[in-house]
Image (cartoon, helix red, strand yellow):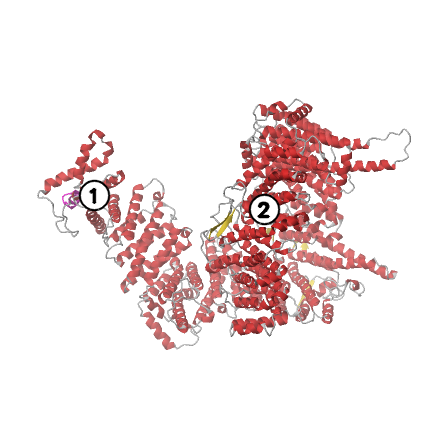
Amino acid sequence: MEASIPPKRRRKGGYAEPCSEPVPIKKKRKERSTDCAEQVREDKKVTRMHQSGIESELEESSSWKSLQLILSLQDKNIDLIKKVDVAFDYVESNSIEEMDGTSQTLQVISTSRTIVFLNDWVQSILISSEKKTKLDEKKPEFGASGSVLDLKCWKIFHFCLEKSKTFHLPLICYKDLLRVIHSITMDASSNLNNMSLCCEGTSVERLELYEVALDCISLVFSSHGGVANQNLDLWILLMDKVLELVLEVFKMQLEGSKLGYFVLQLSSCLFEPFAKFLRLHPTRKNNFHNFIDKLLVPLLHSSHVLHSSSWGSSIEWTNLSKLIEEVLAQGLFHPTHIDGFLNLQSSNRYRNSSDATATVKEEKIAIKSYHRHLFDKVEKMIAGKNGLALIGLAELLHLFVSSVTKHKGVLVDGGDSKQSEVASKKISVSHSMEAELRKSILDYFVQILEYLLEYLNKYLQSDGEAVSLFNVSSTIRSINNLLASFINDKLYLRTEDTSEGAAMNFLKLIYDTLVSISSKISHKKASSCGSDEKSQKELYISVRKDLIVTVHHLLDIEYEVVGDDLESLWAMIFSSTACCYSSMDVKGQPLLFSEILRLGCKLIDLYSELRQVDSSISSLCRALRHSSSLVGDSEAYTQFASYSNALSMLLCSSKFRLSLGNAIKAIPEGQASGCIKQLSSDIMESLDWIKCGHQLKTEQSNKCDSLQFRLRAELMGKVLSEVYIIILDSITVTSGNSYLLGVSLTNLLEIIRPGLSNLVSSQEICVLVDGVTLSKTTGCDNVSICWILVVFFRLILSYRSLFRQTIRLVAPRESEKMSLVMSDSLTIRPASDWLEMAGSFGEDLFSSIIQPPATVLDVIHSVLDICTQDSVVLCPPLVWVLNAVALQRLVELNLLIRSSEYKLQWKDADDSSCRKREKRVTRMRNEAVGLTKFMMESLSSIYKDQIFAPSFGGGIDKSFSVGSLEEKSLAYALWWTNCQHVDIWCSHAAKKDLKKFLTLVIQAFISYINEDNCHSTTHKPMHLEKVTAYQIALEFLNNTISYEQRFVCRYMASSFCKILQMSVSSIFATSGVDLSESPDWIKVISEVEKLSDVQIGGFPSRKPDMVPAENCNEQINVELAKCQRLLTLLVQMPEEYLSLESSSLYITYILNLERLLVSSLLEWRSESCSHNPYQIFRLLVTCRKVLPTLALASGKVNVTGSSKCSLPLPWLLKSLSAVIGVQNSFPEDNAFEAKVAIFSMLHYTSYAWLLASKDQFHHEIGSILSDRKLRRKRKNLKPGTVEPDISECNLQSVLQLTDALDENMHKSLTTFKDEFLHKGCQDLNKLSSTIACFQGLLWGLASTLDNKSFRMKLSNNTEMMTRINSSVLSCMNFTSFLIKASFLEDQPSGKMVSSDTKGVLIKCNLEEQSCPAISDLEAFLSEVQHQKLCLKKSLLMQIFRGENAEASFFLGQLFIACSAVVRLNIQIDLTSIPWSLFAIVVDIAQFLLLEFSRSEEMPHQFAFFWLDGAVKFLEELGSYFPRFDPSLSRDFYSKMIGLHLKVIGKCISLQKKEAKLDNQGKSCISLETSRLDEFKERLRMSFRKYMEKKSSELHLLSVIVAVERALVGEQEGVMANYEIVCGSSNGGEVSSFVAGGIDCLDSILELLLTGSKHLEGTIKEHIQNLVACLFNVILHLQGPTIFYDNVESIKAYERPNSGSVVLMCVEILTKISRNPFFFKKGACHMVQCLRVPGALFQYLLQLQIVNISSDIGTSKCAFDRKFSVELYAISCRMLCTAIKNHGSETRDCIALLEDSVSVLLHCLETVNVHHVDGRESFAWEVQEAVKCASCLRRVYEEVRQQKDFFKEHSFKFLSRYIWVYCGFGPAGNGLIREVDEALKPGVYALLDMCSADNELQNLHTVFGEGPCRSTLAALRNDYENNFQYTGKV
């Protein structure tokens, strides 16, 4: 039994002793306790022999262990160290017992009481140690027994806490424990500088101490309710140190270290109970002061650091940040004291009208308040220059707003907290409370901001020394953050402001202060610009950025803070831009410029929304003109050039120009003419500004004034002109404003005209500005004149363009008047009248300036004299403008020349008139030639600049501005412009210039060389915002309009071949080969054979130095890459623009290049400095890729039948055989790429054989036919004349081809035999090369015989048929041997191979004859259905998985070869065909395709080799079924159909959400999906082949039955015969077999609709069942999951995507409804058709409104917007089809139609306008919603078309629209403007059906008073004005 123990309360003497002899017992028990501990530690070492006796002794002593511990700890004679050891041994022994599972013995004192005692004792030890250390003022020694840093004490404490948690025993933790934690924190802080603590393996003990202490602290506050009698002073003492520790961790960047993790966990453990303590114990006045004085600054500092640090985004640090915010909120803004902050009345002094006495009284009340200490502390913080803490004031404002709204129980609009239940029943009370809260929060905001503004005012009043700029930066950043918080919490709403103007006035005060700061900084920066260091520049950049951001925030809050002084704000922006431009290399400069640009665009956009954009632009221009004076002082004017560049950087940036252009386009129609008037006024001011600068320069003759004038001219030409041109180019001209615009433009012309009058009349280089002549004689420099000319030329160009738009829209009489003003009769006159009008030829660009003007060409030459000096362009923008002027004139000349030439074709006038016209045409042509020559001379600068070098940094901005052009960018701009407008100038250019231009295009195209093309170049990727010469050339070459120009087709081949010859000569310098010469192919082949024989054993195995890195010539690699780009150009070139001559030239050059490449590959080992063989091989593959393209193109243009462009097929075969093993020599890095290249080589060679052999067969057979016709005409031959056998001559080429292939087959077969017998490595690529060429030959013959006349004549030619049969038989025997040897288990292949080819063929033939004879197709069919072959399934599985790429390609070639033979047999009835081979091929194809249908992953890319071949074979096999007996072949036919269903279904599963019925127009995401789409399309073609016109009804019935079974989920031979399941509430699933049935049903319907009438009867019998099956699938799959992009509950590729299957079903149902003649649907099916759209989109509507969180997990499954839009469109199409083709049935189900249309309309309510998350995550973007609305509009319009059926129901659709439009739909959002505009035509169509007396009157009554009735009236008014037909057009 346990001894009786007194209660837990202590006495002075301790616990009563249980026996009368304490000392002996105490001693004895101490010894036993020690023995027990030792026994426990060595329990596992005791032998089993003595264990029983020892255990009994232990059991007896263990019962006294707890009592013995307590007595030992109470004994004063035992020192502290011994007591700690005893307690620790007790803890350790208990831990060991728990690990060993030893059952605890019955204790004298219970364990729970022992834990209570031990807890009190260890806490007393730790607390006393901390007090002693504090008294001694010494640092505690780590590890000292009984000290705060004693690990044993903390482990004891941890043991007590853990055990008490287990026993559910409450423990008391004393308040002084906080002091102990403070000591731990102090120790961690003192050791923080020891970086070794952060490393592994060092200071392990101290880190262990911290971990144990952390666990104890966590248990104290999480499981034991914290410490007793908590004291705020202790908490403040502790948290002050903890915050210091946190800041030190961030300062030393130790966030990721072990110590940093300890600090994080410690902070989190302490801040949470501290926040709880503050929440439960509101601070009193003294404590409040202490809290603010000690913790406010570090709390704000920590909050800012956590928000700005990269580690602050992690979950742990984010939680700490939230805890700090909670501490601040509870400590400062506790609900008990928050009312004191709501009566500050700080904003009263800023009211528009107020009582001063009352204001002062209120302020005194606020000052005496309890809360004044917080604001005093803020003031001290500002004075103390604590920048980081000041930035945290914004967080304080946000916490105050949150606390106030929670306290009052209402929500300020835009706040983050959730709205609580309504506190008052009256709405007025709620609004008054909201206004009161806003006023109180504004007072707090003003109170804080006043201190910051006061500090800034000190800076403004000082000379800059008393207040440092760094402190100003911190203060502005604090204001910035406060304003950002002000915006986020939406504390100011203009429409709900009740502060009597106080908020506005205070914001204006902030704005004025910031503008003053900016002005002072600009002056200070300008005065000390030369002496600034980098750090000082960084500080200026930082201040500028904060100023700009703060002003931006003020504009977001209230735009009227700027007032009418926009000019000052633009001046601030310009000065900041100048500072930014002069600090390009300073940190923070890009961020500053982005903020400046954002603010500039904000100003334009803001005033555009206010319809005051003209005032903003006017202020911009004035500020720019005034800002030039700031740079005019003699000390700082050396920066004048950078100033103009700085403003150009801002105002000419693409973003700013786009914003300005959009603002001008948004100007209302009636304000357009006013905008032009404002523009004219500003141009006058700018010209006067220029004149004043010139006069000042002339009067004073000062260098500074001269530079000032030049700066003004440059600013006007570079910056102001850009603004003017954007305005003129962006104005929208309509018929309503055209007249007023014409008047305004006429006034504008009066301003422009004087400036250019002298230049245009006499070519004198001078400009007249407001009566002052600016020329070289008056002291103006050439550069200034050039800039002023840029302004005038650009204005005249844009003016003419806008004026022409205006003339076309005004009334005819007014247009004639306006054309006289502009001197432009071409715009208003027809072309037939142009030459009849006097002086029409003289009307050009300058006709409106003065009459008669000089020609454009003369003016250009005059200006060029001052624009260029010593081949240096003084003003690049002027050169570009002159080119634009020349292009504009060329456009006019081309119109005149073409119309004149057309007129001259009709010689109906007198000779004198014709001669005059001819002279005019000649003069026009001469002028056009001169202008083109000028453009080409301007472009000649490109030849000098190296812009086509492989440099990725060059180029020009995509939306470049003319004013920002420099000499280098000018070349790119001219190059781009000339390439875009080549059709304008090319007809007038000289032949030499055209050739140079085309050469330049090709050189630019091949200049782009990246690491893929050349390993030796290491360049950075191109900048995405730049347009390089390569991109310009690529755009030119990809544009078909370029090839329509005659010079391109004429000179492209010669230019291309010339460049190719140069590159090849650089690569093979010693070869001396002329690529233009046609070689002797017999000699070439012989040389290649000799080189191949030298390569004993083929190419070497992989060599690590195959691609040399250092000794390889880099220039050669560059030239190889250029050749690669050149050949790529040929592939991209449109085939229709390749002539026969050019194709022949290309082929000759490429074949010669192939010779050199093959020789280089065969000789590379013997060269001293070898080429890069991998690059050589890649180039060879590209050559082989180009040859089929050229052969195909030449075949299309070669209508004569000559073989001028025929390819040398023996060379293609021999070169392929020679290099086929080269990939074995490449290093491992290129192994995969080389393997792909080899397969590409084989494929292109096979295709080349197909095209070339097709061409030769076509030529030979055509020659035979033509020769026979000639023989019939030769009736009078002389006796004895022997006529040559022409047919024999014609067959020579075919015989040579077959002989070469036979020889190659012999070699390949011999090699294969040797390798096969010796079990060596089989080089399947060599066999593939032979088969590839042979199958190309066979397919060429088959393609030729598709011509019926050729097929008939060839059948009559016995000799040729014999040769063809022999060749095919040789190929099939060769193929048969390879298939059986490679893919059958027990084939005795070795016996079949002989030493010569003839023997091989004979033995193979005998082998076939020894087998059971298969003489007809029925026998073949029987063997296919009953044979059992032993396939090498291991090899086939390797092929299936893509592990054996060579075998995959080899098998694919075998499939294609067999399919070619099958096709030939259909065409010409081949004899002696080994049909047993095809049975094997069918079996292999079935095995692989079935494995593919069962797979659950995307096939390897090499698998498509055999997949394509297998499907091609099955497709050709399908042609034989009409010849089979249907009763015998039905099972095999059904098997093939089932195979197609499975494989097509698997393709749909692999395509996932991208699966569609038709792949046309589908964008492929990757190469894999592209190959999969192509493969699926081949399967569909193969499936259609099985249902061709000659198919029997029994076969067609088998197809329909198979598809019907698939649609119901019944798969033959599968136990689970129903593969359509409902799944969960989110939607069901179907198998791939069902999806395949849906796709095949679509193919059947397509066949029927395209004319296959033989299917009509069979389908009509089953159409009802098929439609029912489709509805069944939709019913099972409908659910929210169909609208998700990725559903994780479905394994990838295992099943088809439910959404895609539903979409396919709806498409097919729509197709069926669209053709009622073929498909008769029942009434029940029409009901389902009308119900489906509503049923499907009901789920989307739920997602939009309720935001359902389904089982699939919305966080990982994104809403598939693209799919939903497609489904919406097809659903609307289904409804339209039902309404159109089944009107009566639809009328009977009108309720279902109304329901579906309503659901579709409701889905348009939720549109993601602001791109925010939440409910809008299931919403469409605006453009997507507009597209959907357009589809729904068609439904409304179709209802209108079927007026006879739906007239009485039209008002129902209309009422639903009005109801939703007014915001009474399910979402309550209404319809946005864009969606409503898209719906409006359909709504007007519904209105057109409604009669005013019945339907509209009924709606008017039902709606009653409210927005619906108003909307109906507005709709009717708009309908009558804009839509209703009134009989007039």
Residue identifier under label 2: 1603
Image height of 308 relative to 1539, above or below: below
Question: Is 1155 left, or right, of 1701 in this rendering?
Answer: right
* Residue type, mark 1 in image: Ala
Q: In which quarter of the image is residue 1206?
A: top right
Question: Is 536 left, or right, of 190 in this rendering?
Answer: right
Which badge, 2 or 1, comes first in the chain's sequence? 1
* Residue type, mark 2 in image: Val
Counting from the top left corner in percent of width and height, residue 1234 is at: 59, 35
Q: Nearer the viewer, residue 1601 or 1674?
A: 1601
Mark 2: secondary structure = helix
Counting from the top left corner in percent of width and height, residue 1449 is at: 60, 35
Would residue 77 be counted in the magenta stretch? yes
Task: Tell how many labels.
Answer: 2
Q: In which quarter of the image is the C terminus?
A: bottom right
Q: Is residue 1364 visible?
A: yes
Counting from the top left corner in percent of width and height, residue 1282 is at: 87, 29
- Range of residues picked out in magenta: 68-79
- The residue lying at 63 percent from left, 72 percent from top is 1921
